[in-house]
Amino acid sequence: MTRNTTAIPHPVRRIASTTALAVALAIPLALAPVLTTPAHAFFGGFGRIVYDPTNHAENLLTAARSLEQINNQIASLQNEAQMLINQARDLASLPHSSLQQLQQNVTRTQQLLDEAQNIAFEVQEVDQAFEREYGTPDLSTSEQQLLADARTRWSNTMGGLQDAMRVQSGVTNNIEAQRAEMAALVEQSQNADGALQASQAGNQLLALQSQQLSDLTALLAATGRAEALSEAERSAAAEQGRIQRERFLTPGAGYQPGNARMFND
């Protein structure tokens, strides 16, 4: 089985190579005092080598201390390498992005609001429609005009109710996509390698919640608009009925006598 080295950053591999080289160069230096002739050894009679135990012990102690220093340097380099690996993991970006899906959901809901019938979600158009169709009718308004205004108000109410139901359908259709996206983000957060990935997953979860709040706002707006149109229609119908009743009860000119002609006389 081959060992995968692509996941280790380039600076870490460089430190590992430097560590191996330092160990290779330091070991002969550490053992050199042991292999060399003691400093206080001397040749006695008949060519014998006189052994100095004190000098030998000092050489062994020096070699042990040198080896300990080398081990400490190796441990320090290993710690630095591990620190670089951890930093690389913390800086790794999250491979998953839910931005496109969230934008599609918001765009779909916004399109449903933009397709509002008869009266759009604009303050100026609402003011004009109420002034034109929901205002107090004049006593001189003809019956035909009163009937036409009543039909317009009924059409606005029905259109508002249909718009509310269409927005409800769109928001309901977004639920499945939101559920799948939430599951994916939670999994990415749990399997995050570093702090940056966990933070990015958390930010995307917050964006998903914002999109859900956007759907809820659109639903409340469409439902409230339908209820307002229905209430406005009832109020306008009551006022129109009052005007028609007042017109009916207002005394007229009464009967006026005149000449009658019969049989073409």
Image (cartoon, helix red, strand yellow):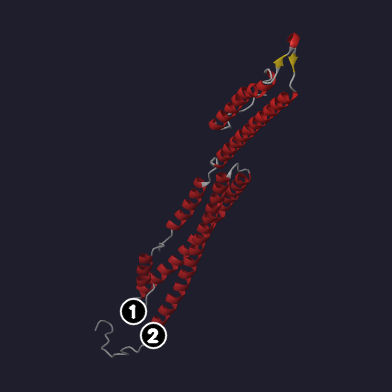
Q: Which residue is mark 1?
A: 138
Q: Residue furthest left?
A: 265
User: Residue 47, position in %: x, y?
Assistant: 73, 9
Question: In the image, is residue 241 above or below residue 152?
Answer: below
Query: Which secondary structure lies at badge 2?
Result: helix
- Name the residue: 68% across, 26% down: 63
- Name the residue: 33% across, 88% down: 252
Cα–Cα span, label 2 and label 1: 11 Å
Please state which of residues 114 and 29 is positioned toward the viewer in this rendering. 29
- Name the residue: 40% across, 67% down: 152
User: Residue 141, position in %: x, y?
Assistant: 33, 77
Check residue 68 in the rendering and tell me which mark sits there, or answer none: none
Query: Residue type at mark 2?
Result: Glu
Query: Which secondary structure lies at badge 1?
Result: loop
Mark 1 burial class by Cα count in 10 Å: few <14, some 14-19, many 20+: few
User: Is 183 on the left-hand or right-hand side of 105?
Assistant: right
Q: Quadrant of residue 9?
A: top right
Q: Which residue is mark 2?
A: 246
Please state which of residues 77 and 50 is positioned toward the viewer in this rendering. 50
For marks 2 and 1, the one nearer the N-term is 1
User: Residue 17, position in %: x, y?
Assistant: 58, 26
Please state which of residues 105 and 130 is positioned toward the viewer in this rendering. 105
- Name the residue: 54% across, 51% down: 203
User: Residue 217, position in %: x, y?
Assistant: 50, 61
Please state which of residues 82 and 237 is positioned toward the viewer in this rendering. 82
